[in-house]
Image: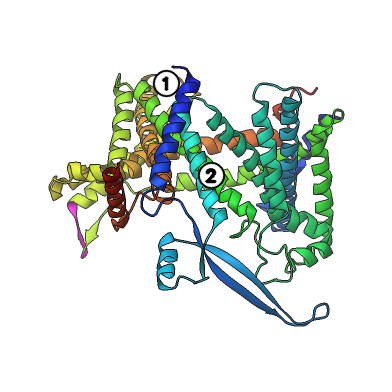
Amino acid sequence: MKPSKTWVIIVAVIVVLVGIRMSIGQGMARAYVERVDQSVDVKANATHVATTFKWTEWHPVQPKMYEAAQKADANQTRFAFSWANTIGLWLSAFFTLAIFSFLYRDNPGYRLAEAVIIGVSAAYWGVVGFWDTLVPKLFGALTPMLVHEKVLPSLPDPTMGQVVAMYFALALGIMLLMRLAPKGGWISLWPIAFIIGVTAGLKIVSHVESDLVAQTVATFQPLVNLKSADHVTQLWPTIWASLANILLVVGVLCCLTYFFFSVDHKGAVGRVARVGIMYLMITFGAAFGFTVMGRVALLAARVEFLFDDWLWLIDPAGKRIVEMATAVGSMLCWW
Amino acid sequence: MKRLVPMWIAIVAGFVMLLSAFFPITESLGETMGDVFNVVAAIAFILGAGSLAKVNLAKISQRDQGWGYAAITLICFAITLAVGLGKFGVPPSAQFPALGWSGEKDAEGSIFGWIYEYALVPITSTMFALLAFYVASAAFRAFRAKNLEAILLLSTAFIVLLGRTFAGVVLTGWLPDWASGLRLENLSVYIMQVFNTAGNRAIIIGIALGVTATSLRILLGVDRSWMGSGD
């Protein structure tokens, strides 16, 4: 069977199953929102007269809240069906299935989702950088009036030092963009040098402080760790706690010996390094176990999204199951 | 000139940051340098955007294989950027209701927030979830209990995995209290607190020493490999 035919069959089966699911009971994948009217009174000042600003916000709610409100009053306007969020829900389901389809093999659905995520994530981080860094820091220092009037009235006025620093940053930024120019790309090395230098200076301090010193200090543990209750030393808790500390200190020293490559790993050093390897293998095993657990948790979340938020199949109260069983039974009887 | 100036920029910027941690008088200078760094890093996103556009436009104009996907990438990029920068659909903040752009960029009801919730989050989390299958498959093919080290790695992974699940609790729940340390959930905690801490600590100390040495080489001008070949 050709791959294209396989995909047509797979997609057709999914469409048919989803179609059946949509026609059963209450259907599936609809999003509802709650209407929240906002109103803020603004007092008069030198530039504005006293005004009341009103706007409406729509907050997502569970379908059961909408159903309960509809049951109580069919003409209620507090809860409403949301086209935007429903389309979003279906789009999310499509993207989730498209990415999962890669488990079989590469296909146009997966490549489409991949293309979307490249474009969206590049723009997302660009927008985050613009609103979180460029507006308050760069524009807040270079065009403070504009930022105060349009975006952030509470932003403090910049000092002369900040203004000079931001002109310097702007100059470095423009130099960085020269990399895209056909000539003069070498000038972009200057801002890169600045980034490298600042990172190096920051990393020395942070790594020495929080990793080297803090981790070394944490390793200085008492090898006899007395555990007591009611001022009486307990034998077994003391033994276990002391053993844990001994194993910890020995483990760190052995692993560090393994990482010390200036001497040959022979004789006593070799034996200590071998114990270090054992510890590292246990560490890697634990890291592997943890990584798998994390990924499985994410997988469970995606499966929960598909079966609960999209297909509406997970139903702790058991009402939908009964409804679906009745609907399927009546369909079969009719057929 | 092309290599000397960048080297001195790196040295001066690095030492200012280094000194700001030790001398209070240079502390504010260090903070300002940090702000400049953040702004340059944010402008670097424009460089990234330009590069993305350049590569994809070339693909489209030359009708390379998969040019349609390049077009989708560019369209998604342009739409997300436009709605994000324009804060379309963002309600004003309650603090400054008179200012249309005062609301959060990804507030409830904004198009940018919608894209984040219904496109970015599902695709990225599903991609990471996909790794569960590949990690399991790679482990099945690569993990063989050939020697003591491999057995240690395998058994630790097995204990940690089982110890964090309900199955692990059920499997060894029958052990009496005096042997409760051997129950999988307790064994998993003991491994994490003692053996895993020891191994990770040594790795972290090694990394810290490596980063410090590399940073010092850059700050002293010994390591210039970051400048490239110089063409």
Which label is found at residue A265? 1
- What numbered label is drawn on residue A91? 2
In this picture, which residue range is highlighted in magenta? Answer: A230-235
Measure how far apart labels 2 and 1 are at the Cα level. Answer: 57 Å
Residue A301, position as x, y percentages in the image: 41, 46
- Mark 1 — on which chain does it sit? A
Residue at screen point 28% across, 43% down: A332
Q: Is residue A285 magenta?
A: no
Instruction: Of the two numbered discs 2 and 1 on the same chain, state the one appearing first in sequence.
Output: 2
Q: Do callouts 2 and 1 point to residues on the same chain?
A: yes
**Secondary structure at numbered mark 1:** loop
What amino acid is labelled 2 in the image?
A: Leu
The reply to whether residue A88 is in sight is: yes
Q: Name the residue type under label 1.
A: His
Image spot of residue A279 (x, y percent): 36, 32
Q: Residue at x 47, y 22 (%)?
A: A5
For the C terminus of chain A, the quadrant is: top left
Residue B29 falls left or right of residue A112: right
